[in-house]
Image: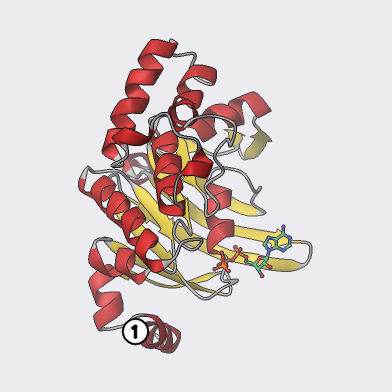
Amino acid sequence: MDTSLKAAAVVLDSVSKSYGPVEILKNVSVSIAPGEVVTLLGPSGAGKSTLLRCINHLETISAGRIYVHGKLIGYREVGDTLHELSDREISAQRRSIGMVFQSFNLFRHMTVLQNVMSGPVHVLRTPKVEAAALARDLLEKVGLPDKADRYPSELSGGQQQRVAIARTLALAPSVMLFDEPTSALDPELSQEVVATIRSLAEQGYTMLIATHEMAIARDFADRVIFMVHGEVVEDVPARSFFTTPRHERSRQFVARHAG
Ligand SMILES: Nc1ncnc2c1ncn2[C@@H]1O[C@H](COP(=O)(O)OP(=O)(O)OP(=O)(O)O)[C@@H](O)[C@H]1O
C-alpha cells in the first residue's frame, strides 16, 4: 500500500457504482486528509448520497476500491482477488464511520440521553454510568445540556439533528459523513445545525458533507467536490470554487445557489 493511501482519512480509488445498467458513480477518485472538511455539492441526482453510502458500505460498489484510514472497506484483498467481509466485520468497520442522515433517525421511545448513550452501551458494551457521562459531555458539545431527559418529539428539528450528531459522535468515529443534514429544516433551525458542524470542524473532525447549504461550503469547508451525473467535475479549495468556478456547470451552480 502506498504511503499517501495510508496517510489519508478516506480514499476513493476509481469507484463506480451501477444500479442495473445505469451507472450512478463513474470512476470517482477522491482523497480526504485527516482533519479536512469537504463539502460535496451538485445538482439533485448527481450521486452525492450514493457516494456517502458507498463509503460505509451501505451500498456495494461495482468497481474500484474505498479505504478509510488505510483499511479497505467491505473486502479483504488476497492477491488480486477481493473477498467480501462478513456482516460482523462490516459492522465493525461502520462503527468507525459516523453517518448523520437528513431525517435524524432518533429512537422516539427513548430520551435524548438514552439515544446518545445507546451506541456505547449496546455496541461498545460501555458501562451505563460511563456511557451516560459521555452522553452528557456530547450533549454539552452540541449545545443541548438541558435536554437530556426530553423525548425527541419535544425538541425542534434542529435540536433533534444535533442529538443525532451527538449520538454519532458517541461511537468516536474517525470520519463523519453527513447526508443533507439541514435539508429537512427551515433556515433558522438549519443555522443551529450549521453552527454545530462548524464547531466540529474547528475541533479537527474529518468530515464529508453532502449539502445544499452553501454556508457550510462557503464559510468553513476546506474543499468543495462538485459532482454532476456521477462524475467529479471540480475538486478544489472551497474559496476558489465560489470565486473562480472553472467549469460551465459549476458557474451555473454557483450563480444559482450562492447568489
Ligand atoms: N437504490 C437505487 N436504485 C436505483 N437507482 C438509484 C437508487 N438509489 C439512487 N438511485 C439513483 O441514483 C442517482 C443518484 O442518486 P443520489 O441520491 O445519490 O443523488 P444525490 O446527488 O444525493 O441527490 P439529492 O441531492 O437529490 O439528494 C439518482 O438518479 C437516483 O435516482
Is residue 118 positioned above or below 100 on the image? above
Residue sitting nearer the eye, 108 or 67: 108
x, y percent for residue 214: 35, 71
Mark 1 lies on residue: 246
For the residue marked with disc 1, what is the amino acid? Answer: Arg
Residue 166's image quarter?
A: top left
Is residue 136 positioned above or below 1 on the image? above
Residue shown at the point (25%, 76%) measured from the top left: 240
Can residue 80 be spotted in the picture? yes
x, y percent for residue 190: 38, 61
Is residue 110 positioned above or below 133 on the image? below
- 123 on left or right of 19: left
Residue 229's image quarter?
A: bottom right
Residue sitting nearer the eye, 170 or 234: 170
- 22 on left or right of 92: right
Residue 69's image quarter?
A: top left
Residue sitting nearer the eye, 135 or 155: 155
Q: Residue pushed farthest left?
A: 202
x, y percent for residue 14: 53, 58
Q: Tag 1's secondary structure?
A: loop
Number of residues whose C-alpha sits closer than 10 Å to that of mark 1, classed few (under 14), some (14–19) or many (20 or more): some
Residue shown at the point (37%, 83%) measured from the top left: 254
